[in-house]
Image (tube, grey):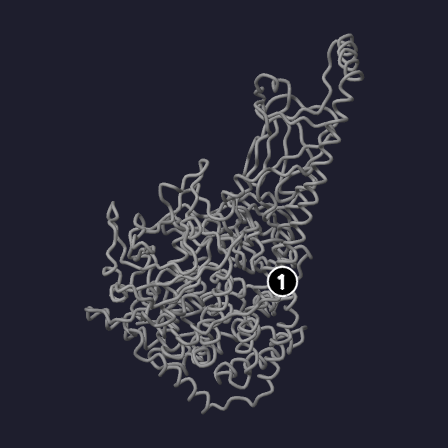
Amino acid sequence: MTFDGVEKTFEDFTFTYYPNPIIDGIDRTVSIMSGGLDIKLTGQRFDLIQEPRIIVSSLTTDASNSELCNGTETLLICPTPNFPDHVISTRRRRASNGVMTANLTFDFDGYIVDGGFIDYYPDPVYESFSGPNRIYASSNGRLDITGIGLDLASMEDDVQVLLGPNGVCHVDVLEIDVVRCQLPEKQPLAGYENGSLGQGPAKNLPAVTVLHGNVRFSPGFVSAWATKGNPLIAIVIPVVIVVPIWIIIPMIILVWWFRKKQLEVKRAKEEVKMIRMNILKRVREVSNTSLDLSEADDRVQKQGVPFVGHVQYVTMMLFAGLGTHPETTEPEYMEDFMEHSLVSFYRMLKEKAGMIEFIRQLENKKTGLGRERELIASLLAITFVSEGKSIHFTSVLTSLVEDEIVTASESRRRMDTLFTNTESIAVKLISNWFALFMFEYLKVYGVYPLYMLYQAVKAQAEKGPIDVVTGDAYYTLEFSKLLDQEIDFHSLGIDVVDEDGHVYLHMTVLDVDTVKQAKQKILDSLWKKSYCLLPRDIDAVDLVWIQTSGRTTLLQDIDKSSETQGKTMINTMKSFGIRNGSLVALIPKNHGDEYQTLDLKEVSSKTYESLQHVTVEMIPESQLSQPASNAIHLKGGVEELTRKKSNLPDHMNQMKANLDRNLAIPHMLTMKASISPYVDGIFEVIFKKPAKIPLPVKYLFDTFDALAIKYAGGGLPEDCADKWKKNCLSNFWSSVLTNLPSMFEMPRSETADRFVIALAGALNDAATTKTLRQAESDHLPYYNEHPLQRKMMTDYCTQVTSQPKVRPGKLNKACSSISKEFKGQFSHLSNLLHLYNLTKNDMDGLVE
């Protein structure tokens, strides 16, 4: 060791280096927003870690660190941190009532291991006990605590129920709306955890405290144990009470019971009849899977597929989540010394040995800087491809692939997990290479099926109601987002008119659509019919209802009539009284405080066409329509607020609620059946065209085969090579599906966005052999197709392997074609300068 330049040698001490810890399994990747749920890791060499931590970060926020993990050599228990949302924008925070996805990593004393993604569900909401004193009277030794969303991402072991300062109620049942636990035989000490006592009747009772992860809630007190008192009073009081009961009360009770049973039987028959009608209705819906996409297809025939192009594709596939983008313009000025440095730097990168040594040095010096590593790899890829060095890029890549395999073989890592993430510069570079060299294939064979898949999902979802507050939809493939409440809705045909009152567009909306939803459907139809080349922003226009009397009404989601029983009811087409054949018009957004009656001549299609193409980022957030925090659209609407409470027993009410939820599953089947031709089209593109595979990708797969034979060790070489190919394929296509909504200039839908992300997850799951419990797999629409998809992957890789090996001349020609594809799209000098500034302090002896 060196102290102020003086070296000190400790001869009696030595350092011993052990292989890095290995994670073999993660028991779950879900949590609640407040965190505190334990994630169990199984693996090897965990006892070498001094400070193991779990780190959760989203794409736009800082990481959220948790407390240290605890465990043994082969087991680690890590409490999840709270979701890192302290800098999330207001509009994203409004969407937090749904599932939020974040990156999951583990920090083992600076050694960062990628855990994939973690889903954050809303925090459970517990309810206080009823009554003014909040006392729960138990007669059977059981305690029931009710709430909302209690079992989201949670199990019985995640919930503790404390009684007073020293008691525990053992939890044995956890359902979506109730936690049940067994009370102890003896009453715990009275009061709260800290010993303070309750007031009034609760003074001698223990307080109930629920610990659910980091969520802490006290619903009240529990009374379940007999109290001690004067034995004479205990005898006299029952006698005084029992005598009149035996004489008078039985007759009253008998009459009341008879009438109550009659009423219960009547209501039960009505409930059964209603359930039967709902079942028949929803079963009939499953058979109706027709989907009309003629408008979307017509636009493609006229305008072509609205694919974003080279620059946006590279930005999404290579720079997603890195906080920057590739430069497309040259720098305005550069000093002579900097220009000389860049020339020397680029000369080093063009030498294969120098390039590989450069990457190796960076891998050692950028430990723990995952995002910076990925950025370096992406800038390297752009630098070579845009400058026509694809052949050199491919040659370097094959050497890096061999380095990764050799390192895994020597450290005895699992060979089949290689190339599954981008935690190193080399692996990220391989992922980037794959994305660039698959671009031409995607553009020729993939963009049309991908575009039509998105349009199919969007069209089917919009055939049913979508709650604008919760995001729950009548037609969806997410079980957690199913609109399980029975909604009475009908289609409405409305006409959009121009300044002369002439109809130029006939539209179909739902009577339960909000004004914003109706505007969105009209704007989408105008875009599909090529009235405008780019999608228009919904907040740039207003919708006006033109009545037969000539009177015009500005339609707004929330107005003075929206307040109902302390809630803000969002207006719908039905609430305005709009019917079939009603006339509406689009006008430019008026941000004034008052609205003046419109002259029809002001409402013209030309006015609409002249609207500036507006994006959400260009409009101040204060001007965007924002539902109130207590706003209600479909779930918990007026019908539910005013509906009389069922007289069925509690257990039957609970059974009915669960039945309603499961009865909504046919909506998922309808959605899946209606879009299945388009999903099949995607898998056709991914796995049914092995003869069209780009030659450089075929060359990479051949390299995998050769290296597997050389380094596979005890495993079967064919299995290792096959797994590496599947990892690269699933990573690429999952990234394509995840970024699909941004690949096209088109109107978007939150439901459709979530679907393609779920489909990307299904594709990744299909590449593994992960099995789920029946209750979990029932809610995943494509889980049963995983074996078929795995077989399609295997067959595809087998067919590619059987093709003749790529000759050097054809490989060079194919690489040159990729360089021509991206030539002139990016600024070579600006991206090289960015790369140099990132790495100039880490190039020991490589650049003069």
The residue at the point 40 percent across, 66 percent down is 742
The residue at the point 57 percent across, 73 percent down is 726
Q: Quadrant of residue 358?
A: bottom left
Residue sticking out furthest to the top: 232
Query: Looking at the picture, how far across and down is residue 334, in whole percent?
Result: 20, 69
Query: Looking at the picture, how far across and down is residue 374, in whole percent?
Result: 42, 64
Q: In this figure, what is the number of numbered marks?
A: 1
Above or below, comparing residue 631 to residue 400 in the picture: above
Query: Looking at the picture, how far across and down is residue 804, in whole percent?
Result: 56, 90
Left or right side of 810 for 264: right
Residue type at mark 1 is Arg
Element class at badge 1: helix
Above or below, comparing residue 327 to residue 100 in the picture: below
Q: Quadrant of residue 179?
A: top right
Tell me if I can see residue 69 in this picture.
Answer: yes
Left or right side of 73 for 230: right
- 474 and 698: which one is in front? 474
- 676 and 52: which one is in front? 676
Left or right side of 546 for 786: right
The residue that mark 1 highlights is 284
Above or below, comparing residue 649 to residue 824 in the picture: above
Tell me if I can see residue 413 in this picture.
Answer: no
Quadrant in the picture for the C terminus: bottom left
- 161 and 623: which one is in front? 623
Query: Looking at the picture, how far across and down is residue 793, in whole percent?
Result: 60, 75
Left or right side of 301 for 53: right
